[in-house]
Amino acid sequence: MSRISKETMKSEIRKCGQDPVYFLKNYVRISHPLKGLIPFSTYDFQDDLLNDFKDHRFNIILKARQLGISTIVAGYAAWLLLFRREKQVMVVATKFKTAANIVIKVKKMLKTLPEWMMISEIVVDNQSSFELRNGSKINASTTSAKDAGRSESLSLLIVDEAAFVEGMEELWTGILPTISTGGRCIALSTPNGVGNWFYKTYTDAESETNLFNAINLPWDVHPERDEEWFRDQTKNMSKREIAQEFECSFNMSGETVISPEDVGRLTDSTTEPKHRTGFDRNYWIWEEPKDGVGYLVSADVARGDGADNSVFHVFRVDTFEQVAEYQGKPNHDMFAMLLNSVGREYGNALMAVENNNVGYNVLDKLQTLEYPNLYYSTKGSHEYVDNYTAEFSNGIVPGFSTTSKTRPLIIAKMEEFVRNEIIKINSKRTIKELQTFVWNNGKPEAMRGYNDDLVMSMCIGCWVKEIALTTNKRQSAYSDAILNSMLQANTKINTTIPGMVGYQKTTDPFGHKNTLEKRKQEAKKQIEEFGWIFKG
């Protein structure tokens, strides 16, 4: 606007101060990679976003890439700093450069305003922070600084790529008091699997159980993008990358040990248990014991510090479907008695209990209760040993040993079972743990703050099914085939020769009747009885 009156200037300033959408559309300019400095012509979904920032103190944005959301957030911060006094804005991100880039965007927007619109000039200007004469200021910080924002009284906290922030729970706990007296928060990110602070906060916002306003912005909210654009952008991307970058899918985007597709398939197949029983109602049953069906129980014992649970699964051996499950915090004696009862109820099922540390307490109790079908293995080699052999052999230990050697093997076996649809999981509790069972620096484990007891118990079950049950069944089949191919006889092999004591002309070396001698005797008898026929 050129050569406008003071009254018009005042009117425009008032309009801009009341409405961030009006401010950005009419006065803010942004840098375009090809066109240079251009007016910020916002789209409808971006206008809605600005209104959400104004109307809600806490906003959490699940977004696709390339929607200009960080630029919109920078525009809102510029509006807040310019038209409100004594506002403190902090931008945090996993990388300092990322946070500083938003601060730089805010600064450029203000510096390219018409001179008369810049009602409060910049008085302190640093690379990653600046301050206006009205007392408002903004600075960038990295989330690796655990004290980020703790000493500040914040008016607005911006968390960029919040799903990728390690230790965001602790960071949020420290910052929350600084914005509790009227401050605001905008957390934005593409998805990064489930279980992290961003996932929990967003899903709680969707169910309206926290103060955040949930905003979902997939790729197709942009009016200039269609299926052809999407296909062109994603043609060289994996399913996980597409889910993360464009589709706003939590389940498909994470670095889970089990592929997101398989986790999704398992999630869709879960069912409610027929019975919820036990002293704490945490023993879930989908199928009662059936005659003639073999069962396997795989169990993991809690350490006893309250951080994890004692758990077990019951699987049908033939279909390897999960038919029962327990997850709770009983003492070791109670857990052993529950295992003893369940195992006997399911036809003296093979009982594989993880034997590390406190697991031996449960196994000792099961032995005292004379449970008839415990899993045993050879110490050191971890090879399965049947109950009869275990009773008369040295170096045999009860239970399954999860060690640095066996852990990757049983996890790989579980992944194989899931991928090839050999196992069927009915429990949503187990699936929930699978969703947070991730690769952490190359090591498969539960995400921080989550447990993997049910997952590891399932891994033991898969290993025992493959190694102890399937292999033994195969060996039995081989043995049966060998025995069936051998000729069974009650007589001993005759190794005598004529002239030796015990020599019998009527038997061959294998104890069978000597066919030639038998024929001679029968021919002689026929001649004696029927010789008259041949006379003549």
Image: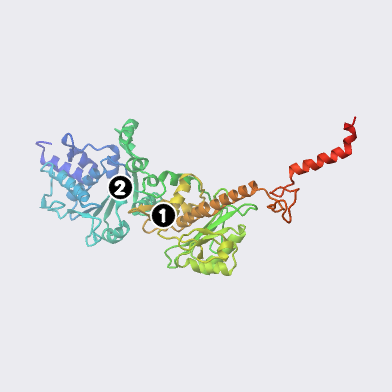
Q: Position of residue 256 (x, y in %)?
A: 39, 49
Label tally? 2
Q: Nearer the viewer, residue 231 or 237?
A: 237
Q: Where residue 101 sits in the image (x, y, percent)?
A: 19, 47
Q: Which residue is mark 2?
A: 189
For image coordinates 19% across by 38% down, the residue present is 26
Q: Which residue is mark 1?
A: 408
- State the residue at coordinates (44%, 49%): 415
Residue in view at x 42 percent, y 64 percent: 307
The residue at 72%/51% (across/down) is 498
Foreground pick, 256 / 10: 256
Identify the element where label 1 is drawn. helix
Label 2 neighbour load within 10 Å: few <14, some 14-19, many 20+: many
Residue 90: percent from the left, percent from the top?
Answer: 22, 54
Q: Nearer the viewer, residue 529 or 490?
A: 529
Determine the secondary structure under disc 2: strand
**Looking at this view, is 450 or 124 the one in front?**
450
Visible residue check, residue 517: yes
**Is residue 50 placed above or below 370 in the rendered structure?**
above
Can you name the residue that lies furthest to the left here? 3
Q: CA distance from mark 1 to mark 2?
A: 32 Å
Point out residue 242 in the picture as x, y percentages from the top left corner: 34, 40
User: Which quarter of the rendering shows the N terminus?
Assistant: top left
Mark 2 residue type: Ser
At label 1, the amino acid type is: Pro
- Tell me how the rendering is colored: rainbow
Dot 1 crowding, Cα within 10 Å, few <14, some 14–19, many 20+? some
Compared to 361, does 474 lie above or below? above
